[in-house]
Amino acid sequence: MEWRLFIDGSKESLKVVLLHNGNEKPSLPIAHAVNTKESYEIMEALLKLIKYNEFQWKICADLKVVGMLCGLQGGYTKNCCFLCLWDSRADSQHYIQKKWEARKRAVIGENNIKYKPLVNKENIILPPLHIKLGLVKNFIKALNKESPAFNYLIGLFPALSYAKIKEGVFAGPEIKTLLKDNKFTTLLSSKEAAAWKSFRLVVENFLGNNKAENYKTIVKNLLKNYKAMGVHMSLKIHFLDSHLDFFPENLGAVSDEHGERFHQQMKDIERRYHGFWDTAMMGDYIWFLIRESDNSFYKKQIRSQNYF
């Protein structure tokens, strides 16, 4: 299939867009709802409006939305994985038990199933960007808060509050800055440095366009080093630990990062319209896409000049 569906929400609106697999074509916004929160009822109505059952696009979204689409109960629950019955509270088994009982059926009231699933789990694409954010978040939370490395982060990101840095709440640009910063690595302890090096290798050789032949070994080393460092296993780490084969062949081609780019562009458009959000606003965004994808808008018009 040529397109994938991206769903994301903010405090102001809920956005749905089609992204081209391979990211060679501009995004196609198909739904925009203001003052609408992410909920199961909204997702159900949304999929009906866009005739999802007819097209059956692959879906890339954050794990909160994925859980809703799969009928899972929200919040910190015991069985929060849509693929298996992973016990999120069995800390003693994390990093040890790799295989968990697969979800064979969705029965409301059992194993944190609250609603009827809206999509087939085979149509879900695990979000590479959000997994990167989760890996960094858990790494930073495991850092010694009195260490030089943590204090260096405070100075490196002065615009972020101490609370955000402490909880590892970084966005994509902050992660890129941190990956390019060589000094940060020198301030880490041996276990922390090994874990950070493993993370960088996973980003470069798996969670992007480049998938190394030994990617399974690279991910395995990441998990080993995270365990040695004392990093708590989250749902995002669990996917790397138990469902590595569920990831697409080329994560860069179907990444949620391009959906987040659309999300930021729409925020700029919404800010420009100052709350007067209507079809004219979406038309303005479509015109922006046309200009962005048409090279003729960027070619300088050379006029012939006569000097005699």
Image (cartoon, rainbow, N blue to C red):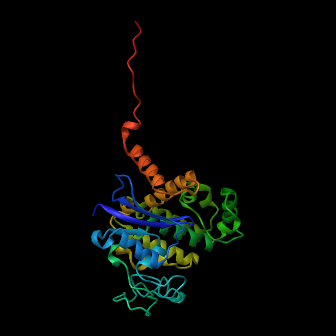
Please report the residue visible at 59 percent of the width from the left and 64 percent of the height from the top.
170
Quarter-of-image position of residue 180: bottom right
**Residue lying farthest to the right in this orientation:** 146
Residue lying at 47% horizontally and 85% vertically, measured from the top left: 96
Is residue 145 in sight in this rendering? yes
Q: Is 297 rendered above or below residue 208?
A: above
Q: Position of residue 68 (x, y in %)?
A: 45, 78
Residue extending farthest to the top is 308
Of residues 32 and 268, the one nearer the viewer is 32
Q: Nearer the viewer, residue 157 or 17?
A: 17
In this orientation, does residue 124 appear? no
At which x and y percent is residue 25? Answer: 34, 52
Query: Quarter of the image containing the C terminus?
Result: top left
Q: Quadrant of the N terminus?
A: bottom left
Which is nearer the eye, 96 or 116? 116
Residue 244 locus on image (x, y percent): 38, 74
